[in-house]
Amino acid sequence: MTQTTLAMALAQGFQRHGVKRIFGVPGGGSALPIIDASKELGIEFILARSESAAAIMAAVTGELSGTPGVALACAGPGAASLTNGAAYAKLEQAPLLLLTDGPASTLHQRYDQNALYAPITKHQGRLTPEYGVTDVEEALSLTCRAPMGPVQMNINAAGAVAPATGNIGVPRGDDPPPSDETIAAAAALIEKSRRPLLLVGLEARYGAAPDWALRLAEALNCPVMATYKAKGVLPDRHPRMAGMFTGAASEFQAIDAADLILTFGVDPVEFIAAPWLHDAPIVEIRTADLPRMLLQPALRLIGPICATAEALLANDAGNSDWTSEAIEGLTKTITDRVAVSSNSHTAHSVTRAIVEAAPGRIRASVDAGAHMISAMSLIDADLPFGALKSNGLSTMGYALPAAIASALHDPEIPAVAITGDGGLMMCLAELTTAAEHGCGVITVVLNDSALSLIDVKQQVQKLDRTGVTFAPVDFAAIAQAMDIAAWKVGPGDDMTEAMRSAYAHGGPALIDVTIDASVYKEQVAALRG
């Protein structure tokens, strides 16, 4: 048995689980003793400018570290504002603990906060001094238990400072691997295959999984495609990498050429909601028995994916006919279909400049929008989490908070936030968060005064252009007013030189580049078919 205040029990739990910092916007109540106890143990509190951004920062921190990200907010409006980050964490398997004050004890600001979070978290509850140590440990552990995801707990001010009791308990062991019979059945399908394809997803980013993904690819002598979340699990320049998997028409040649598809750590949320038009049987390898994919796999191998890969390789199956030339041809087909040209700057040329000017390894976070097609295609990632993107939720206002989380977690790796003007306006104040903490975040805002992806959809449906444009914004001037170095890049200006200057600056910086959005329609058509 242990006894301490509930706030200190939380801080000790953070320390036990490797939490280095917590994010949020306090409103008094339980947040203040939690922040104080955490500071006592060397855990930093990052004051964000909005709860939504705080939750995204915490979720991305959880992904990068493999330990729980932590965000806190006040009762009522604060708790409500954390939900975007909670939905991101639930759909994209990010370990995240959400601490919400209260709920309110009077009708003012009172609603059922646990019920609000029920659809978008793994678990909801309340931390109380009675058995508080036990509940803290269970909540933190649950965020990292397969499938990883968010846990939301209410905690009130009186409870936070009261003595807490309980014990840590015995950690839960790993889930068992698939049965020998299931492994043998999968090995038989692999042995029969002559053109297998390995598709890696978000669960393949952690621990030894990237190494096992590579071993599978080499043993099967097959091409590999990665979902947006799994970009970098195999380095983008690896000879077996055939490109990104988004479910779009640009990838059909690679998938149609396969006679067996192995999904390694792919979550159903990573498939776009479109008919599956391919005939090859699918062997699904993933950690947890969650809702199935849009299509019916021929076989499901549920359990720790590294142990599953090891068991498959022990069977020494695989008789692939793939050649390096064939894999290279698939890669070129996908790359060529998303390329665009213009006399002005485009998302394509801007991303090329970001890559060409880079002094070494960078980590790019990419916002939702039409620019993501070029950005995710051209950014080179040689390690998991080399590129960050909201895929399952596809939320705007993601890139800048994610880049701040990256800069805090890995300050030696330049963090580049690639965002549209619409996405940046949703979290513009977080530029001051980056400045306050000296984050080396370079925000590249593609300025076209429109929600361009929605604009394209409107054009395709032959609708009037309404509700997708806004007045021009001088983001460079705004950044400079926040004491952030900024550059404006017009149609005739050198984007690569501006990026070199931003990288050399070292501190937070912003590049406001005017782009030609007219190419998006053609590019989206080439991608989606």
Image: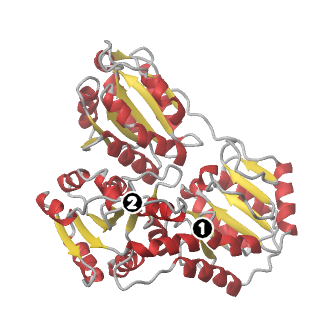
Secondary structure beneath label 2: loop
Residue bearing mark 1:
528
| Mark number, residue 451 | 2
**Residue 219, picture quadrant:** bottom right
User: Residue 249: x percent and y percent?
Assistant: 64, 70
Q: Residue placed at 79% from the left, 74% from the top?
A: 195
**Residue 41, picture quadrant:** top left
Q: Which amino acid does label 2 sit on?
A: Leu
In-front residue for pair 153/86: 86
Distance, label 2 to label 1, CA atoms, is 19 Å
Q: What residue type is labelled 1?
A: Arg
Q: Residue placed at 31% from the left, 12% from the top?
A: 106
Classify 10 Å Cα crowding around label 2: few (below 14), some (14-19), many (20 and above): some
First reached walking from the N terminus: tag 2 or tag 1 = 2
Secondary structure beneath label 1: helix
Above or below: residue 46 compared with residue 253: above
Q: Residue placed at 19% from the left, 66% from the top?
A: 476
Would you say 266 lies left or right of 366 here? right
Can residue 118 be seen here? The reply is yes
**Residue 406, picture quadrant:** bottom left
User: Residue 128: x percent and y percent?
Assistant: 40, 17
